[in-house]
Image: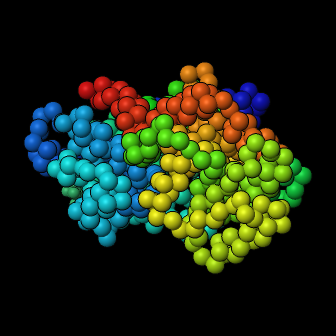
Amino acid sequence: MTLTASIATICAITAATAIFCAVIFPFLLRQLGSHLLRRTAANRSLILKELGVSDHGCLVGFFHPYCNAGGGGERVLWAAIRAVQEKHPNVMSIVYTGDQDASKTEILSRVQTRFSITLDPDRIVFLYLSTRRYVAASTWPHFTLLGQSLGSLVLAWDAFNLLVPDVYIDTMGYAFTVALAKLLFGIPTAAYVHYPTISTDMLGSLPANAGLRTSLKRIYWGLFAELYKRCGKYADKVMVNSSWTANHVRQLWKREDVAVVFPPCAVTELLEKISGDKPRQKLLLCIAQFRPEKNHKLLIDAFAAFYKRTEKHRDARLVLVGSVRHDEDATRVYDLRIQARETGVKDQVDFVTDAPWSEVLDWLGKAWIGVNAMWNEHFGIGVVEYQAAGLISVVHNSGGPKLDIVVDVDGGRTGFHATTAEEFADAFEQALSLPEEEVNRVRQRARKSAQRFSEEVFEEGWLRAFDRLMEKAE
Ligand SMILES: *[C@@H]1O[C@H](CO)[C@@H](O)[C@H](O)[C@H]1NC(C)=O
Ligand SMILES: *[C@@H]1O[C@H](CO)[C@@H](O)[C@H](O)[C@H]1NC(C)=O
């Protein structure tokens, strides 16, 4: 074969591949999509009939295979559906779930007791998937990331065989399914991302000069990141649960239009039950499970350093409120008590274990400062509670407490950031020494800051994106 012939062959193959990827493959997928649409047409009219507005109803599919899990991700799902039910009477919410053992009544009553969210049973439909095992980590002992992602495609295929929705929303982080929905049906799509499937931190965490295994892993993760990146462009709307996730998703998906919609927290109760102008005691309150990463050790050291130096605040106390789940936690509390004795602040530190919520509320109502010492906590719902209760926060200078929660409001501080024991000690001294008007201003700003995490603000942010999708669907 001559050189020109080889070049011509290569060109022809490249062109053929390009045409296949750009034209034929999408065309085939759309054909497949139309086929599914026809196959599930009967289901569709059945559901629309139930809704009672057959001609102009809209079916919005929420992909949430673990909808009955009762965690933070589920709170977001249910609050989102409630908002949709309140604002859009013509929408039927379809939840694709793998919880085959739970009936609709059971799921809805759990939503009620667990989250106090009431949903209209006539405007929600559960479609049960039988292939959830494909997204279980245990199904893919090797290549878990890729396995689960491909598994999610099987699950989505299962879902679309039951019903093709008019709008598709992934609320569990299965980005591949968003791409599939778009390629098959060309419908409006959205993703609410709690956590990126692969993060740039992960890619950076591999040692530089390691052996073959690590090199292979690097290639695998790199390829996976590339695939994940491509999925990102198929979502019309992207929402994320925190600034941390937003930064990663922006980087990975190379898109700027990522909206931070904080998950709803129950701040209204605190704002209502705790009055803003009650006199407070010099209590430094820490509400956190007695887990090692919560870093109570650092707090006790910091408090000891502060107490050694302070002259004005000899009556300050550190109050550690938290649950003790098992023997290990109990041992940790024991060790912390010893630490308090050894650092000479035994009589100034209180341990309050497994207190009921009413008692926690009581502490929140009378403490001065709320502290959090954990490094790189993703969010920190406890810190939001400090703010709602009007405490001055002193938090670790990292993660969600720094980026999202203890930020300036109306140009003024809502608390302090610290890293070392010395810095925490300084912040305690400062927070307790602020002039009275300034203390009140900080407390007011903190309470205002907490409102950013309320259920109302979540609904606004969520509906802003959802309304756009509905416009596209029309
Ligand atoms: C929807 O249609 C499929 C057949 O395509 C059927 O197997 C399934 O049971 C139907 N589901 C509902 C909820 O009607
Ligand atoms: C976002 O989701 C991740 C993963 O579930 C969680 O660790 C983090 O706390 C969440 N952030 C907020 C603001 O709830």
Residue 362 location, x and y as percent? 48, 54
Residue 145 location, x and y as percent? 60, 56
Q: Quadrant of the C terminus?
A: top left
| Residue 87 shows in this picture | yes
Q: Residue at x 56, y 22 (%)?
A: 410
| Residue 34 shows in this picture | no
282 vs 31, left or right, is right
Q: Nearer the viewer, residue 342 or 261?
A: 342
Q: Residue at x 76, y 31 (%)?
A: 2
Residue placed furthest toward the top:
411
Q: Residue at x 56, y 59 (%)?
A: 147
Q: Nearer the viewer, residue 420 or 41?
A: 420
Classify residue 105 by image quadrant: bottom left
Q: Nearer the viewer, residue 100 or 361?
A: 361
Colour setup of the view: rainbow
Residue placed furthest toward the bottom:
327
* Image vertical order of residue 255 relative to residue 32, above or below: above
37 vs 77, left or right, is left
Q: Quadrant of the N terminus?
A: top right
Q: Residue at x 47, y 37 (%)?
A: 276
Residue 181 location, x and y as percent? 39, 42
Total numbered circles? 0
Residue 190 location, x and y as percent? 42, 37
88 vs 239, left or right, is left
